[in-house]
Amino acid sequence: MKNMTRRDTLTGLAVGTLATTVALDASAQTAPAPPVDRRPRTYDLIGQAAPATDLERFGGGRLTQADFRGKTTIVQFWGIWCPDCLADVDDVAELNRLISRDRKLQFVGIHTRGRYGRWGGLAPFFAEKGYRFPVAIDDDSAAYKAWGIKWVPSFVIVGTDGIIRDYTTDLKAGSGIGVQGLLAKARAVAKINRRA
């Protein structure tokens, strides 16, 4: 075996480093592109009146236009068929619990598209999960279309005057705004409406 000189050692290290760098560059070029986030970042109806709404409420009654007056309302479009909605549902239950203590705010979910996954309906879903929050039924997606929704879950904040003031998607994925972030937005809208 031949004795290696310092120069041979350094040359070998340099060649090895270059080969590793070339291999890493080649693998980086073939790596798949990250998934495209299709969540909308804007909402066309901000500043406009909430669309005419008349939906059956889960558990009885109707959700109508009159329900969006007098309190700042967080309206969530969602579905139990939607993975991102299911990821947010614990937060939505917490959001509703916190809102129920605030006289200036209210919450309503609108379950859309008439798909219920393995549960077959809202009653089995709520019974299994133990959730309790107000939900209206939009099985034909008429409200989804009228409200210009392009993603679920979507949260629309309607001021006491019935005007849409803010919008965001998801509490965890996407915006990552969380319960407190969405509450802060709703409280800011409520504060502006009180001054107006």
Image (cartoon, grey):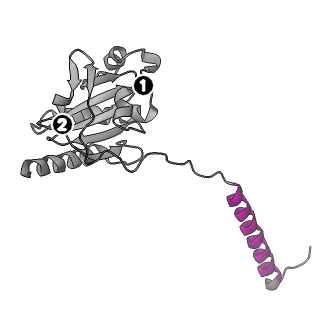
Q: Which mark is residue 113?
A: 1
Q: Is residue 53 visible?
A: yes
Residue for point 35% across, 39% down = 154
Amino acid under disc 2: Leu
Q: Which residue lies at the image location 20% right of the left edge and 17% below the top edge? A: 61
On-image quarter of the N terminus? bottom right
The quarter of the displayed image where residue 121 is located = top left
Count residues near mark 1 (Cα–Cα under 10 Å), then give few for <14, some for 14-19, many for 20+: some
Residue 20 highlighted magenta (yes or no) = yes
Classified by dominant secondary structure, the portion drawn in magenta counts as: helix
**Could you tell me which residue is drawn at 38 percent across and 48 percent down?**
175
Residue 65 drawn in magenta: no
**Where residue 178 sits in the image (x, y, percent)?**
31, 45
Q: Nearer the viewer, residue 90 or 8?
A: 90
Magenta residues (range)? 8-30
Q: CA distance from mark 2 to mark 1?
A: 28 Å
Checking the image for residue 98, the label placed there is 2
Q: Is residue 88 above or below residue 118?
A: below
Is residue 131 visible to us here?
no
The amino acid type, in three-letter code, at marker 1 is Arg
Q: Nearer the viewer, residue 85 or 129?
A: 85
Q: Secondary structure at mark 1?
A: loop
The tag earlier along the polypeptide, 2 or 1, is: 2
Question: From the viewer's perspective, is residue 137 above or below residue 41?
Answer: above
Q: Nearer the viewer, residue 163 or 33?
A: 163
Residue 86 percent location from the top left of the image: 40, 31
Q: Quadrant of residue 101?
A: top left
Q: Please state if 12 lies on the left or on the right of 81 as rendered.
A: right
Residue at image coords 13%, 51%: 192
Tell me residue 24's x, y (percent): 70, 63
Percent of width and height locating residue 122: 35, 18
Task: Say which element carries label 2.
Answer: helix
